[in-house]
């Protein structure tokens, strides 16, 4: 059962684009809904006069816009800026405000490097794989001398490998997983690299991978067999059934099949745009 949320302020005709989250918002309530689960996707880039003007002119939140402008003049931080929105929106319960306040405090105590990693991880959770890859790469290029941040680098390489694997870029995925294994020596990184290698078409590259990581051919063959069995299981999935239905429809009516295929392609386009972020 869903819930109905009444907006305290008008919905804007012109949306505000959250650059860091790659998303349009049309109301304070929509912003708060986004904040509830994606607060790490926001950053200091929201602290602009443009955002305040949007609140004032398009949403009608005149008092809130004025408060936020004063906070920027007084050089208040991102934590205080977000909390002002959370408190003045009237959207959250007392417990929810406390919970978000704790999240913001945690962000204050974590390094910028750690916060950006969490942001990239949230992009992954939203299936925005290319956006996540860009964020992971920027983090790795940034570099750090902080030992705790260096330990996080292995996780970043592993997660970037997962993003590439979900984009079917298996050779890049293998390279990322290997780098993750070099840094953190996590067995699951080597296992993920082996699984991605099963989908590589370059036989020489596969052999080099097996030799380098001391994986016996019989182990790799058994892994490929397990993956093939999993692939066969997709034949009973809803998506596979759609494709089979379109194939049967084409034999009956090419016109109807064309319409169904066009609708499916449009759906895949939308999903791809989400992956791109």
Image (cartoon, grey):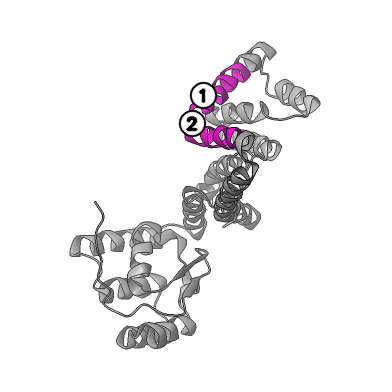
Mark 2 Cα-neighbour bin, 10 Å: few <14, some 14–19, many ≥20: few
Above or below — where is 274 with respect to 57? Answer: above
Mark 1 Cα-neighbour bin, 10 Å: few <14, some 14–19, many ≥20: few
- Residue at coordinates 60% horizontally, 55% vertically from top-left? 276
Q: Where residue 98 sits: x, y (%)?
A: 24, 62
Q: Are marks 2 and 1 in contact (CB under 8 Å)?
A: yes
Q: Where residue 258 sits: x, y (%)?
A: 63, 46
From where the camera sits, is residue 227 visible?
Answer: yes
Above or below — where is 187 with respect to 165? Answer: above
- Seen as rendered, the residue at the extreme front is 252
Given residues 144 and 12, the one toward you in this image is 12
From where the camera sits, is residue 144 visible?
Answer: no
- Residue at coordinates 33% horizontally, 88% vertically from top-left? 62
- Residue at coordinates 59% horizontally, 32% vertically from top-left? 248
* Residue 259 tag number: none
Is 198 a magenta residue?
no
Is 248 a magenta residue?
yes
Given residues 49 and 183, the one toward you in this image is 49
Query: What element does badge 1 sit on?
Result: helix
Above or below — where is 33 with respect to 183? Answer: below
- Residue at coordinates 36% horizontally, 85% vertically from top-left? 65
The residue identified by callout 1 is: 233
The residue identified by callout 2 is: 237
Location of the C terminus (image quadrant): bottom right
Q: Where residue 239 sits: x, y (%)?
A: 52, 36
- Seen as rendered, the residue at the extreme top is 218
Query: What element does badge 2 sit on?
Result: loop
Residues rendered magenta in the picture: 223-249
Q: Main secondary structure of the magenta part?
A: helix
Mark pair 2, 1: CA separation: 7 Å
């Amino acid at each position: 059962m869903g819930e109905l949320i009444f907006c305290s302020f008008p919905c804007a005709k012109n949306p505000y684009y959250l650059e860091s989250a790659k998303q349009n918002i049309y109301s304070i309530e929509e912003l708060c809904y986004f904040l509830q689960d994606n607060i790490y996707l926001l950053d200091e880039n929201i602290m602009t006069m443009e955002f305040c003007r949007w609140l004032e002119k398009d949403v009608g939140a005149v008092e809130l816009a004025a408060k936020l402008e004063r906070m920027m003049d007084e050089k208040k931080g991102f934590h205080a800026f977000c909390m002002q929105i959370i408190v003045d929106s009237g959207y959250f319960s007392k417990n929810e405000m406390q919970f978000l306040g704790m999240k913001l405090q945690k962000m204050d105590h974590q390094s910028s490097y750690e916060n950006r990693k969490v942001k990239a991880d949230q992009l992954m959770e939203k299936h925005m794989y290319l956006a996540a890859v860009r964020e992971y790469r920027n983090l790795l290029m940034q570099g750090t001398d902080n030992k705790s941040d260096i330990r996080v680098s292995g996780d970043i390489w592993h997660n970037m490998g997962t993003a590439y694997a979900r984009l079917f870029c298996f050779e890049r995925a293998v390279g990322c997983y290997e780098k993750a294994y070099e840094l953190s020596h996590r067995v699951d990184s080597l296992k993920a690299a082996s699984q991605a290698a099963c989908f590589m078409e370059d036989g020489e590259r596969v052999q080099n991978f097996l030799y380098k990581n001391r994986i016996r051919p019989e182990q790799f063959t058994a892994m490929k067999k397990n993956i093939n069995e999993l692939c066969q299981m997709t034949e009973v999935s809803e998506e596979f059934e759609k494709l089979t239905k379109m194939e049967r429809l084409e034999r009956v009516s090419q016109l109807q099949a064309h319409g169904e295929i066009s609708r499916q392609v449009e759906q895949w386009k939308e999903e791809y745009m989400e992956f791109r972020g």
